[in-house]
């Protein structure tokens, strides 16, 4: 796996310490790093880097059944893996409770308040899952950058690991989950490593211990995102929906694969 044009490519996923990125520079093998913020990550990369990131981008003012449009389109592709695609609510809900939260009880109370905003801005009314609420801070990080710096919209693209694996596996969803009851599933990880190796990765790279602050599944997800960044750079990737929609700031709303 290496960059295929005269530019750096990056696949990115959120992790405990911030963001994990698997990057490929022209003619070089991939590297991996963890950065504390998405802004810091972008600043560490050349200005023309194409970035595919596992995080929702583009926030609607109102949502219909299933969340934003991309979620409703990609879930049916994934079979038993479709629960990995969270329903993302309205912009108002995502920004309703930015924190910080003093303790776990405050966090759950904030979740309930954000859920009430989501219910008021959706039809049929739908609250926010705990899992989706847990990534709102990450969503806001990227959103704030794309609102303030419109030129980034041409190089930062939303993707999703399980949709990426579906694409790389000839339109077939992964058979096994990456996690079972919150713990990494070795068989599911092996299935994904084998697939990524088929798409150019050296197996030793995939088998390495991820950097401090990132889990093994975060690392593989970022590796999958890099393959999508390569597809985007080559003009081979396709968005769901096609063409992408936009939110009220003009930010594209689509999952790229």
Image: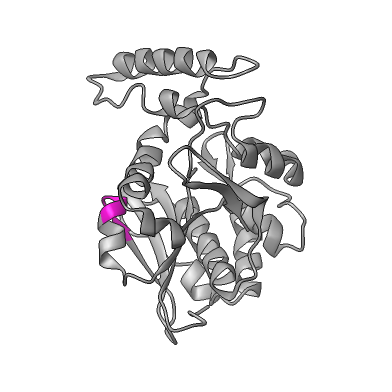
Tell me the residue at 35%/45% (across/down): 147
Q: Quadrant of the C terminus?
A: bottom right
In this view of the protein, which residue sits in the foreground, 243 or 113?
243
Q: Is residue 255 visible?
A: yes
Query: Which stretch is magenta?
Result: 34-39
Residue 43 to residue 235: above or below: above
So how many labels did they put on this image?
Answer: 0
Q: Specify whether 90 is left or right of 145.
A: right
Residue at x 52%, y 55% (from the top left corner): 221
> Residue 53's spot in the image, x, y percent?
47, 54
Q: Residue at x 26, y 19 (%)?
A: 103
Residue 190, x across and y down, in percent: 62, 60
For this view, does 232 lie left or right of residue 72?
left
Q: In this orientation, does residue 81 appear?
A: no
For residue 81, side relative to residue 62 (left or right): right
Q: Is residue 36 magenta?
A: yes
Q: Residue furthest bottom?
A: 27
Percent position of residue 29, x then y: 44, 81
Colour scheme in use: one colour
Q: Nearer the viewer, residue 227 or 217?
A: 227
Residue 234 in the image, given as x and y percentages of width and height: 58, 75
- Is 219 contained in the magenta span? no
- From what the image shows, is residue 215 above or below residue 114? below
Q: Residue at x 42, y 28 (%)?
A: 94
Left or right: residue 241 compared with residue 229:
right
């Amino acid at each position: 796996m290496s960059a295929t044009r005269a530019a750096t490519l990056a696949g990115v996923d959120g992790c405990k310490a911030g963001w994990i990125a698997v990057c490929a520079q022209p003619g070089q093998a991939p590297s991996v790093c963890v950065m504390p913020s998405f802004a810091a990550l972008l600043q560490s990369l050349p200005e023309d880097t194409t970035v595919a990131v596992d995080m929702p981008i583009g926030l609607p003012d109102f949502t219909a059944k299933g969340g934003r449009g991309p979620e409703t389109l990609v879930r049916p592709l994934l079979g038993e893996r479709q629960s990995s695609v969270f329903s993302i609510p309205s912009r108002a809900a995502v920004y309703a409770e930015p924190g910080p939260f003093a303790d776990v009880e405050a966090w759950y109370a904030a979740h309930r308040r954000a859920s009430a905003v989501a219910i008021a801005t959706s039809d049929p009314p739908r609250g926010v899952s705990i899992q989706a609420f847990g990534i709102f801070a990450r969503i806001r990080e990227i959103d704030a950058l794309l609102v303030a710096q419109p030129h980034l919209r041409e190089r930062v693209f939303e993707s999703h690991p399980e949709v990426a694996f579906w694409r790389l596996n000839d339109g077939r969803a992964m058979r096994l989950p990456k996690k079972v009851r919150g713990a990494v599933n070795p068989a599911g990880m092996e299935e994904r490593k084998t697939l990524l190796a088929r798409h150019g990765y050296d197996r030793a790279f995939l088998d390495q211990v991820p950097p401090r602050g990132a889990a093994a599944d975060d690392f593989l997800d970022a590796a999958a995102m890099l393959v999508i960044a390569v597809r985007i750079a080559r003009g081979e990737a396709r968005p769901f929906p096609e063409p992408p929609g936009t939110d009220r700031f003009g930010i594209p709303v689509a999952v790229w694969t």
